[in-house]
Image (tube, helix red, strand yellow):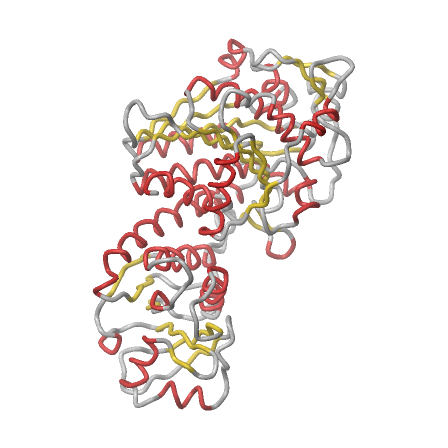
Amino acid sequence: MDYSLETASLDTLSCDCLILGLYQDQQLSASAKTLNESTQELLAKIIARADIAGKNGETVLINAVPSNTIDRILLVGLGENQPLTIKNYRKALVSAINSLKKTTISTVVCTMADCAVIDVDSAWKTRQIIEVFSDTVYQFTTCKSDKETDFNIKHLVIASSDNELALAKTGLQQGKAIAEGINLTKHLADLPGNICTPSFLADQALALAKTYTKLEVSILEEADMVKLGMGAFLSVSRGSRQPAKLITLNYQGGEANSKPIVLIGKGLTFDAGGISLKQAPGMDEMKYDMCGGASVLGTLLAAAQMQLPLNIIGLVPSSENMPDGDANKPGDIVTSMAGKTIEVLNTDAEGRLLLCDTLTYAERFNPDVVIDLATLTGACLVALGRVPSGLLGNNDDLCDSLIAASITANDSLWRLPLWEEYQEQLKSNFADLANIGGKDAGTITAACFLSHFAENFNWAHLDIAGTAWRTGNNKGATGRPVPLLIQYLLNKAYG
C-alpha cells in the first residue's frame, strides 16, 4: 500500500472512499463538518436516520455522494466528544479499515488525524493510521496459489492541515518504516518451518544489509560457536539436520564511541520439544518460536529506514529443536559459554539455552542495555493471557522506560518480579543450574535462569509467548513487540 499526505480542501479531493469521524449525539468531527457543508448537509441527513449513534467503533458506509468526486463516505464512531484514549483511537481505526473488507475500494482518504487524542501529537496519530491500516490489510499468501486478499486498497492518503504538516511528515516516515518492519516480522513468522530455517533467517538478514548501508551482518556458524564454547546453544541444535546460526546485525547510526543497544531475539524456527516431545495438537504453531528473532529483524529494518541516530546490535540465535539419536536427553549436563554448567531436565526448555550463550556473547559489544525477547514460556500465556507481554529485568530505569514506550505504542507490558527466592527452584544436585524450576512460576524462573548470564549489564527480558501470534481461526503472527521496541528506540533517540 502507498501512503501519502494531503493538505488540500476535502471537497476538492477525488477518491473511492473518504473516512470521517462522528462523535456521540450526532456531533461531527472538524473534517466531517467541512464536508457536510459542501454536500448540502448530506451527512446530517444520514445521521438523522439514526443508522449510527457515534459510539466508538461503529461505522456506516455511504455508497453514493451526489455531485462530488468522492465516491463513498465512511462514518466512524469516536465515542464522547472529548479527547480519545490511545486505545479508543486505535479501536476506531481498526473498525474503519475492517469496514472496507470485500469492497472494490482502491484509494482511501482518512481524516482521522484531526481527532484529539490524549497526550499525543499529529505525528503519533498519522503513524497510527498507517500502522493500523497496514496491520489489518496484511494477509499471508506466499504459500497459496490464489493470491487474492480481502482488501483492494492500494493508496492511503492522510488528510492534514498546513499547521500540522511538519508533524504529519514525521508520522508518515515513522509509520511507513514501522509498518514495513512489522510486515517483515509477520511474514517471516508465518512462513512454515520447512522454508524458514536458520539458514533462511540468516539470508534475510544478509539481504537487509545489502539494502541499508549503515547495517552490517555477520553469521557465526556452528564451528565458530564450538571455538567460543557455546555448549548450551549447540546442545539444542544437535537433534536437527539444520545447522544453527548466530546472526549479528550491526546498525551504526550513532556516534562511533556510543554504547549500543543490544536486542536479542530467540530464533527457534521449529520447536518439537526435542526428546521431551510436545503433544501433537497445536505443534504446527511451534513455527512461531522464532518470533523474537523475526522481531529483531523487523526492528532493525525500521530503525535503518528511519535512520535513527543510535547504535543498535541485533543478535538472533537460530536453531531447530528436534528429537534425534544425538539430541539432548533429560539429565544431560552442558557447559555454557560463561563456564556455568546446566542440567537439562527438560529439553523443551531450550530457548533459554540459546539465549544464555547469546547473552554472554553480547558482553563483547560493551552494551548500554540488553533486551532479549522470546516466545519463552507457556506459563506467561497462563499468567497474562494474550494482552500484555511479560517483562522482567535487573534494572528499574530500563524496565520503566520499556513500560512507558509500551503505553505510547499500545503494545502493552506487565512487569513480573525477579526475586531471589525464585532462584531456589533452579538448584541442581549435579550442575551449577537446572534449566527448569518446576511447575510453579515458570515465566519468572525462566528469567531467573537468564539473569545468571546478564549480571554484567543492564538487562530486560520480554516473554512474548502470548502476544507474538494469534491462534484459532485468526491464526497468524502479530508483529509484536516491534511497535514497543521502535517506540523505545525513538524515545532513546529523541527524548
Give left or right: position of 376 versus 257: right
Q: Which residue is rendered at x = 50% and y = 46% of the image?
A: 479
Task: Please name whichever residue, 281 or 124, is drawn nearer the observer in this view of the structure.
Answer: 124
Q: Answer above or below: position of 122 versus 385.
A: below
- The picture quadrant where one finds residue 268 is top right
Q: Which residue is rendered at x = 74% and y = 24% of the image?
A: 424
How many numbered discs?
Answer: 0
Task: Please name whichever residue, 367 or 197, is drawn nearer the observer in this view of the structure.
Answer: 367
What x and y, as percent, mark residue 280?
74, 40
Task: Please name whichever residue, 397 or 348, is drawn nearer the observer in this view of the structure.
Answer: 397
Quadrant placement of the C terminus:
top left
What x and y, as percent, mark residue 397?
48, 36
- The picture quadrant where one finds residue 134 is bottom left
Which residue appears farthest toward the top when viewing the image? 227
Quadrant placement of the N terminus:
bottom left
What x and y, as percent, mark residue 336?
60, 15
Q: Which residue is rendered at x = 52% and y = 35% of the image?
A: 396
Task: Please name whichever residue, 293 or 278, is drawn nearer the observer in this view of the structure.
Answer: 293
Q: Answer above or below: position of 140 versus 260.
A: below
Q: Answer above or below: position of 156 versus 331.
A: below
Give left or right: position of 337 versus 205: right
Q: Which residue is rendered at x = 56% and y = 40% of the image?
A: 192
What x and y, as percent, mark residue 257?
30, 22
Q: Answer above or below: position of 352 versus 308.
A: above
